[in-house]
Image: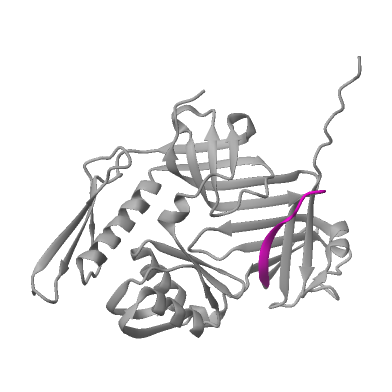
Amino acid sequence: MTPKTRKPVPHPVFKVQMNNKDVTAVLTPHLLSVSYVDFLEGEADTLDVRVEDVDGRFRGKWYPAKGQTLELEFGYEGETLQKAGLFEIDEIEGEGPPDVVVIRAIAAGVKSPQRTHQGKAYDNTTLAAIAQQVARRLKLQLKGKIEPIKITRVTQIHENDLTFMRRLAGEYGYAFSVKGSKMVFFKKAELRQCKPILVLNRTDLTRYHIRDKIMGVPKDAQVAYHDPKTKRLKHYKVRNTDVATSDDRIKLNVRAETDEQARVKAQAALDDANADATQLELTVIGNPKLVAGINFSLDGMGRFGGTYQVVRSRHDIERGSGYRTEIEAKRVQEGKANG
């Protein structure tokens, strides 16, 4: 009888470039861990590189300069590596004993001018035009499709550009992330409808926590606004038909100029509330495909199953511990009760 050939255990690997120079071989003997955190929206991606510094070289001649760039690729030997993007060194920490240096970097493009507060009015324009104007001011390239939503007037009141843009985009059901030199826009409802790219079973999970709620899931969303043409207060309501709901209701305190604006804003708020109904945190053996924005199927979990969207992922490659992935996700489609 021929013995079965054991499938080799996959070996996690990474590649780090600093200022476009591959420094993987130089870092590896000293490396304790590489940690990459990826957000769907609202926060900048981060990269932490921890190295042991027994001889003081990282506090001396190898001390990294703030503003230098880092690039990370990670995954498994023999497979196509996942690219994490471009980062800029923002902070260096030291701790000990034993002596350790931590190089912290944030997604390139998130610079101090983006954090400058300012006031500005935008008149007779569109959401796409405002996004283009903000991107140009921040020296970013706008990517993604934005519907031609007309806006008569909106005001940026003592907000930095990113905070203002996130607020405005969110009101209309959009979100964006800054990746290197690009501001990437996407419609959240469309992203939630994408097909799952992989399946996770109960046996794949080394840890999980799921919260499935009904209380707080609204039955409808309402917008009240003053119609500038009729001079009357108008109301617009969107009912929740997707999930089990409570008797709660969303009453939006947002500006609307037309029924269409009111509908879009009410639907966006309702979609966000539905996505918050079932939330998941889990840990698995490292999986480079689990990055923010992708959808996956969760099987073998009974009523907890379904299609989930990753909203935050963390990838850790550690000396002596291997590679693990932690994610936060929201359910975008219920599954059939199974197993």
Say which quarter of the image contains residue 158. Answer: bottom left
Q: Is residue 253 visible?
A: no
The image quadrant where one finds the N terminus is top right
Judge whether residue 84 is colored magenta. yes
Percent across and percent down for residue 277 are 38, 43
Percent across and percent down for residue 296 are 55, 43
| Camera-nearest residue between 179 and 30 | 179
Q: Is residue 75 visible?
A: yes
Percent across and percent down for residue 102 are 72, 63
Question: What secondary structure predominates along the stretch shown in magenta?
Answer: strand
Judge whether residue 149 is colored magenta. no
Q: Residue furthest right?
A: 2
From the viewer's perspective, is 4 left or right of 253? right
Q: Residue at x 89, y 65 (%)?
A: 55
Tell me: residue 226, above or below residue 27. below
Say which quarter of the image contains residue 244. Answer: top left
Tell me: residue 53, above or below residue 69. above
From the viewer's perspective, is 293 left or right of 189? right
Tell me: residue 199, above or below residue 145. above
From the viewer's perspective, is 18 left or right of 131? right
Q: Residue at x 50, y 48 (%)?
A: 309
From the viewer's perspective, is 132 left or right of 61? left
Tell me: residue 255, above or below residue 12. below
- Tell how many labels: 0
Q: Residue at x 87, y 27 (%)?
A: 5
Q: Residue at x 33, y 65 (%)?
A: 171
Q: Residue furthest top?
A: 1
Say which quarter of the image contains residue 71. Answer: bottom right
- Stretch in magenta: 78-88
